[in-house]
Amino acid sequence: MLPGIVGLIQATEALKLILEKGKNLVGRLILFDAMKMNFKNVKLERDPNCDLCGIQPTITELIDYKAFCEIPMPSAEKEDDDFDEESYSIEPEELANILNAGKEIALVDVREQSEWDICYIENAQLMPLSEFDEHISSLNRDEEIYLYCYKGTRSMKALKQLHEEGFTKLKSLTGGIDRWAEEIDSDMPRY
Amino acid sequence: MALTNEEINRYTRHLTLPEIGMEGQLKFKEASMLLIGAGGLGSPLGMYLGAAGIGKLGIVDFDVVDNSNLQRQIAHSVADIGRPKVESIKETILAGNPNVEVEVHNTRLTRDNILPLFEQYDVIVDGSDNFETRYLVNDAAYFTKTPLVYGSIFRFEGQITVFHPSHEGPCYRCLYSNPPPANLVPS
Ligand SMILES: [Zn+2]
């Protein structure tokens, strides 16, 4: 729904620019909240220090936008540079073999509840990364722990956290549940 | 330039509004707009602006239609899955109003191709979904002095404004001088 509402306000403004009639949105920002069903009108002003349209612009021609939008990761995460992610990774097929063998392991899904409601791997337990700290105490250090998420990024993050807490028997599913659905379980919905 | 009899009949509702009238409808017919993106925002933009009688609609997108787009990108249908979005939306617009000239650009916007493209249009409407494109579009609209209608969506919230280089208002960089940190960008 939301793209329709926003798109049609844009279309209305575009037509008004051509007509040169009415009061347009120059200098005003509409903030629309669909949940509260509320339109807010915020006054906008030109920033005299703007890099582009300010008094002393630093951008006088088109720049490298990819580089401009790539913000370096926060320093806290850089310290893990020598962490050997590969040795803590597991391919979907390997994990499928372990699960099929009926081995006693802990399978941990670190996605959020809304994602879990779409699909999950059988016998997994949900421990969303957003509240992962609260779940750590329920994990057994002696057990092998296999973590997965949607694509493999969050599960590696959770794995590093467990590693710092002294856990050692850890693996993160490469490619996450998305690759699992592609390669192992074709009945699983993809999102 | 004049309206054909078919167009006069088609745009009757506009022609009888004093704020639009024959003068306004002819302005629409002589106008050109470039839509950035043929997705969630681009779909209603293309369909309504086409129906309203904008003379030339340009559309830039390099993506193909996917099943997961159909929940919101209403210009595309099941039969369009796998087709370039610009081709699909062109067909939808022309099915409703064959008087529109639809110019498709099945390409990714870059700093090398954007300026000559923007120079061909009266108004740019940004329906893009990423920060790289938003900054590129903002800067190019500023350098070519083309008005830019901005819209964006995050979860249940939308933002709309107009950046007009010849008016006193701000540009996108005045609002957001830098993109948010990568880990806060919704994907
Ligand atoms: Zn500015």
Image: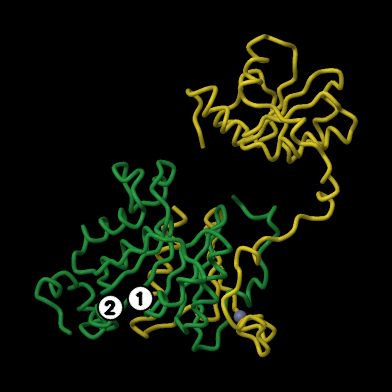
Chain colours: A yellow, B green
In this picture, is B26 found above or below A116? below
* Circles 1 and 2 on the same chain: no
Q: Residue furthest right?
A: A166
The type of residue carrying mark 1 is Leu
Q: Residue furthest left?
A: B5
Residue corresponding to mark 1: A15
Name which residue lies at 39% across and 58% down: B38
The type of residue carrying mark 2 is Phe
Q: Is residue B48 left or right of residue B36?
A: left
Counting other residues with Cα less than 10 Å from the Cα at mark 1, is it few (<14), some (14-19), or many (20 or more)?
A: many
Name which residue lies at 61% across and 52% down: B186
Q: Position of residue B99 (x, y in %)?
A: 19, 69
Q: The disc numbered 1 marks a residue on which chain? A: A
Q: Which mark is residue B28?
A: 2
Name which residue lies at 59% across and 50% down: B187
Cβ–Cβ under 8 Å for marks 1 and 2: yes
In this picture, is A156 found above or below A123? below
Q: Position of residue B111 (x, y in %)?
A: 52, 71
Q: Quadrant of residue A160?
A: top right
